[in-house]
Amino acid sequence: MRVSVAGLLKQRSGPDAVRAAMSSPSRIDRPLWQTLCTEIGVAALPVPDEFGGAGAGFAETGVILEETGAVLCPVPVYSAAIATAAILATGDTDAARRLLPGIASGEKSVALCWAGPDGWAAPGVTAEAGLLTGTAHYVLDGESADHLLVLAGTSSGLTVHDVDAHAEGITITPRPVVDPTRPLASVTFDDVAATTITAKADTEDTLRTAAWALLSAEQVGGAARTLDLTVQYTKERSQFGRPIGSFQALKHRMADMYTLVETSRSISRAALDAVAAGAADAPELAAAAHVYCSESFATVTGEAIQLHGGIGITWEHDIQLYFKRAHGSALLFGQPHRVVTELAKRLHGAMTAQPPTSR
């Protein structure tokens, strides 16, 4: 599967195709997405058999995300995966039967609406009497969505709703982005009637765990390709009559980049395996993968910019796109430093809750 996806992306998602999609109306490559869904079945991987999917899991989706992340492929594979994760996390069989077959086939694009103006700590949309009001920010692939899956706040907690993206009262606004390979939109709801999905109490936490683990796989793919591009460039760029990659100081820096890529790959796959297995430590592993892979990707791309020199910051060179993807993806579903702070609070609380031991 990895070889098949990589081969297809090599043919149809080169730098020129990526840049063309960046300037298209929906900012995605729709024909390529349909090919990935119909011929390889990438969207169907985490969808259970009973809902028209392949019955694999999120670990297999991680394989796809490594490959699409490596070429900054402009297709909604990540947004489809987290929409699937959200539906499965609710435990609502009727909603799964209604929505997942369309996602699995690629016929229906579903965008997740969650974040408020300050991020994902609190939803931007409220629900009252079945009507949605407010604005969801940072919606991935929102402008190309056929359907919206909305996490909304109520007086009793978080609820989940689904609604047609073209329903009356919905305004989808494409937003300018630092990372042009990742389309983001704001979605405003003005008393929009929506179908409520019965959700479990831990739906939000389960979804965040899956989103972090899946994102880490995409980050690994981007970091690995950044390293490959840097090594290739330092073999070709000469100074003082020899390739700059032969200088010992630069070799050491690329060796450090390699270490970050490989350790990121290890923790990402551990997190995805834990999510797929429903392991008790999946939330901690996913949080660790989000923090580590985000920081590693940013470090690797920062080093790549330095090793490319002045050309690395020009629009014509692709390495700057990876630098922007690294910094943009780190902010999704909670910034790393905030995640570390929250984990520290939980650890401190668990330690203080334990009774003191007597000697």
Image (cartoon, rainbow, N blue to C red):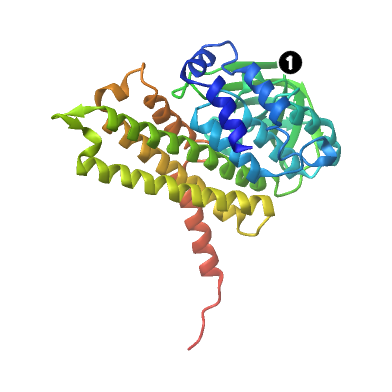
Q: Secondary structure at mark 1?
A: loop
Q: Residue at position x 37%, y 35% from top?
A: 301
Total numbered labels: 1
Q: Position of residue 96 (x, y in %)?
A: 81, 37
Nearest the camera: 295 or 340? 295
Q: Residue at position x 50%, y 51% from top?
A: 266
User: Residue reaching furthest left?
Assistant: 240
Residue 56 can be seen, yes or no: yes
Nearest the camera: 39 or 297? 39
Residue of label 1: 166
Q: Please, is residue 155 above or below residue 77 in the view?
A: below
The amino acid type of the residue labelled 1 equals His
Q: Position of residue 344 (x, y in %)?
A: 47, 57
Q: Please, is residue 282 above or below residue 91 in the view?
A: below
Q: Position of residue 258 (x, y in %)?
A: 37, 45
Q: Please, is residue 282 above or below residue 134 in the view?
A: below
User: Residue reaching furthest front?
Assistant: 241
Residue 129 can be seen, yes or no: no
Q: Residue at position x 44%, y 38% from top?
A: 224
Nearest the camera: 142 or 344? 142
Q: For the N terminus, give its image quadrant.
A: top right
Q: Position of residue 338 (x, y in %)?
A: 47, 46
Q: Residue at position x 42%, y 39% from top?
A: 297
Q: Residues within 10 Å of mark 1 (few under 14, many from 20)?
A: few
Nearest the camera: 129 or 142? 142
Residue 50: name its quadrant. Answer: top right
